[in-house]
Amino acid sequence: MQTSLGLLLPKRLMKSNPLVTWLTQHGALISARLLAMQLGLQSISQAWLDSEAIPCDETHLSFLLPLVREGRLLGVLLLGERRDDDFGEPAEHDILMTLVGPATLAVHNVLLVSDLRHTLSDLEIARDALQQAHRQILGAREDERARLAWDLHDGPVQDVIALGYRLFNSRIRAHELSPELALEIETARQEANRLSIVLRNVCTELRSEVLDLGGLGPEIRRHAYDVQHQAGLKIELDAPRFGPKLADPLGITLFRIYREAISNVIRHAQASTAHVHFHLDDRGSYELVVRDNGQGFTVPANLDALARAQHFGLFDARERITAVGGHFSVQSDPQYGTTIKAWGRIEDVVP
């Protein structure tokens, strides 16, 4: 036979296409002219939706050999005209039918790889879209936190402070008339002061002025000071006293991760000491490490398992740093405590 005209892998086929139906059902070598006559077609190319599906002069097309696997037409071998010195038709047929199995398997594998590549590409696109949506959600949440913090600070906090001053003045005047009334007013004033402190703490939790004005190092130190006095946890700090002022979303992301790690130490680790390390080098590489000496836990191979178990803290921390182009790891051992690490490069931060 002359050189095969090629392997046809049609891109668009209709299941109701008569040619596709015949080739799929029979799966045997057939003359192109005979098949066209059986299907009532002037030419084989009429049966394909893609007019360029058969890349040859159809006048030289002699035979078609369908490649069928699991009831699906994967392709068609296009064979040219026979030469006079070719071996006989029975031998030709046997050789072709021997080759059709490996050829079909090869095409099947090629198509599987192609489908896999398309699937991976679709997954990559979906992952990028999901990360972008997550970044937008985090950004919107932080913007809302900042707005609430400023609204609380400029509204209710100032109102409660002013109320405290008025109660202070009223207590002085009331003392001349009724010491008992003055005592009640003083109690109310102290409650107003306590409420103002609570509201200020809420503002700080929503968005810290120290983080905005002083940078991540001072904010970590401020928070660690409060934790040591309120929770009794000893915190060893290796963080700058001034700066760095990291632009959002990286700065607030690293602080949220640090705070979540310290919160886990207080609530779960039963630790006496936590060590906090933060460093930003001249090349823009940053590293945040929180390590405790408490009881560790079994870290799942995939942190998604924590989210499925309704433990969202570490899962959220990983999602936060990943969304801005960083990396996250958790190591834990019952004898050596837990180490949480977030690291990356500023140049890789996704806005």
Image (cartoon, grey):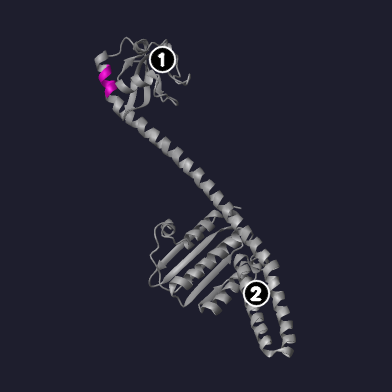
Residue 260 location, x and y as percent? 51, 66
Residue 119 location, x and y as percent? 44, 40
Q: Amino acid at mark 2?
A: Ser
Mark 1, Cα crowd under 10 Å, few <14 / some 14-19 / many 20+, is some
**Left-right relation of 89 to 300:** left
Mark 2 to mark 1 CA distance (whole Å): 85 Å
Q: Nearer the viewer, mark 2 or mark 1?
A: 2
Q: Earlier in the sequence, mark 2 or mark 1?
A: 1
Tell me, yes or no, whether the two marked residues, 2 and 1, touch with CB atoms within 8 Å.
Answer: no
Q: Residue at x 49, y 64 (%)?
A: 341
Q: Is residue 125 visible?
A: yes
| Snapshot quadrant of residue 143 | bottom right
Mark 2, Cα crowd under 10 Å, few <14 / some 14-19 / many 20+, is many
The label number, if any, that marks residue 196 in the structure image: 2
Q: Please state, as top left, top right, bottom left or bottom right, where the N terminus lies in the image.
A: top left
**Left-right relation of 14 to 30:** right
In the image, residue 161 sits, relative to residue 116, either above or below, namely below
| Snapshot quadrant of residue 245 | bottom right
Check if residue 96 falls in the magenta segment: yes
Q: Is residue 284 visible?
A: no
Check if residue 155 falls in the magenta segment: no
Element under disc 2: helix
Q: Amino acid at mark 1?
A: Ile
What residue would you read off at disc 1? 44
The residue segment tinted magenta is 92-97
Element under disc 1: helix
